[in-house]
Amino acid sequence: MLNREKSCQAFDRATGVIPGGVNSPARAFGAVGGSPLFIERGERQYLYDIDGNRLIDYIGSWGPHILGHCHPEVTAAIEAALSCGTSFGAPTERESELAELIADAVPSIEKVRMVNSGTEATMSAIRLARGHTGRNVVVKFAGCYHGHVDSLLVEAGSGALTHGVPSSPGVPEGCTADTLSLRYNDAEQLADTFAKRGDEIAAVILEPVVGNMGCVPPQPGFLEACRELCTKHGALLIFDEVMTGFRVAYGGAQARYSVTPDLTTLGKIVGGGLPVGAYGGRADVMDSISPVGPVYQAGTLSGNPLATASGIATLKTLKATDPYEQLEATTTRLIEGLSDAATSAGLPHQTAQVGSMFTLFFNEEPVTNYDISARNDTERFATYFQGMLERGVYLPCSQFEANFVSVCHTDEDIDATITAAREVLTSIAR
Ligand SMILES: *Cc1c(COP(=O)(O)O)cnc(C)c1O
């Protein structure tokens, strides 16, 4: 049995002063039951909680830690930057170094602006797209998450094609009236929408590989269709690569699938575990931002010395070591093992993997869009999650999140994870 005594006490304390005891709802165990573990430290592929349990980590802080926790080069870079001061509110050379690394890696990016989170990146990219094109309508896809930006907090609904319906109280309908939410992987619906409203559409924003309804890859031709339709109708194509950037390939999904958007949003890995976001793209579009152009966007701590040091060290290490083939092979071995375990137990399931992102879905049919993902057996997932946690495997606490493998995960970790899954899935089937 996993000892959770101190974590339970810590959670009681936290709920007294922090809403729900957490600073981001993804950390709460609402979907799986029980209370979250409180973490003391991370080391390579492991988390250690305050009760002294060691857990194999498949979240990696929800994406950033592709190099594992406390990578020596990243830690050293942050320490070196720290000794020179934490923030100046004036330019530093590190900002150009990181911008050059990003522009070299990501095919669509000629110029890039640093911000402090993925949410800020998508919010700013949408404003830029609207300002640059002089149009208001933004197309998104149900099940894609782009941070908690007002205008992007929209679910698909029957009325979604004509009016975006906000999916959170506090978001006035006025904020989402110009947001259209369509079905992911449905190029025909997108073409119909462009045929009707093409001259109003400023941008199409999507996760080129979705991570936020579980891992859902683009079907062949879908990204290409998005590109073609945007070009034809003068809309900007925005790839939200906050999760996929430097994850599914060094150059992101756009490098992996050879489809080049006009704008790209980044976060997570690009900050190496510090709070960072970035948006970039064609130089002529990016030059519409203040102070060159009229579209306003700013940030007191943007391009922060510690965050840029962490990002530079992370990207340089990834570039020098090129771990992507190895990561993919490790992940394939894991997902095949999990799938075998579910098959042996006679449980209906689907697997999805792109690079080192993956999801084991408890679903009868292949998951290609949100309507199908919404039919996942979340109760079965909750039992699976708790059983894995008891065995020292720390999975995302929701069926609708992607799992991540880091360069530190060893064959022994993978074997231990598959063994745990066999036990748990067999007991579920009984
Ligand atoms: C995590 C994520 C965001 C939001 O980033 P934050 O840093 O949490 O604000 C946006 N888009 C995608 C695709 C993400 O995965």
Image (cartoon, grey):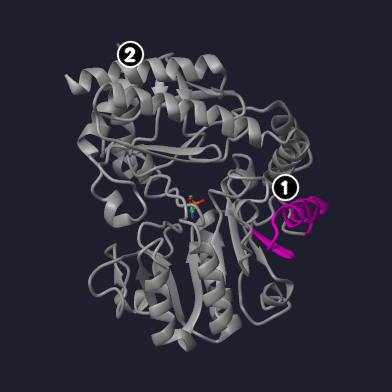
Residues at marks 1 and 2, CA–CA distance in whole angstroms: 39 Å
Q: Which mark is residue 305?
A: 1
- Judged from the image, the secondary structure of the residue bearing numbered disc 1 is helix
Q: Is mark 1 within 8 Å of ligand 1?
A: no
Q: Earlier in the sequence, mark 1 or mark 2?
A: 2
Q: Nearer the viewer, residue 77 or 61?
A: 61
Q: Nearer the viewer, residue 320 or 5?
A: 320
Q: Nearer the viewer, residue 89 or 282?
A: 282
Name the side, left or right, on which 76 lies relative to 239: right
Residue at image location 72% in from the left, 53% down from the top = 102
Q: Tell me, yes or no, if residue 50 can be seen here.
A: no
Q: For the view shown, which residue lies furthest in the right direction?
A: 93
Residue at image location 24% in from the left, 26% down from the top = 346
Q: Where is residue 134 drawn, in percent x and y?
A: 55, 87
Name the side, left or right, on which 189 lies relative to 269: left
Q: Quadrant of residue 154?
A: bottom left
Dot 2 amino acid type: Asn
Residue 141 colored in magenta in the image: no
Q: Where is residue 369 drawn, in percent x and y?
A: 35, 56
Q: Nearer the viewer, mark 1 or mark 2?
A: 2
- Judged from the image, the secondary structure of the residue bearing numbered disc 2 is loop
Q: Are marks 1 and 2 in contact (CB under 8 Å)?
A: no
Q: For the view shown, which residue lies furthest in the top direction?
A: 1
Q: Is residue 35 above or below residue 142?
A: above
Residue at image location 39% in from the left, 61% down from the top = 184
Name the side, left or right, on which 379 lies relative to 151: left
In magenta, the rendered stretch is: 91-114
Q: Quadrant of residue 365?
A: top left
The quadrant of the picture occupied by the N terminus is top left
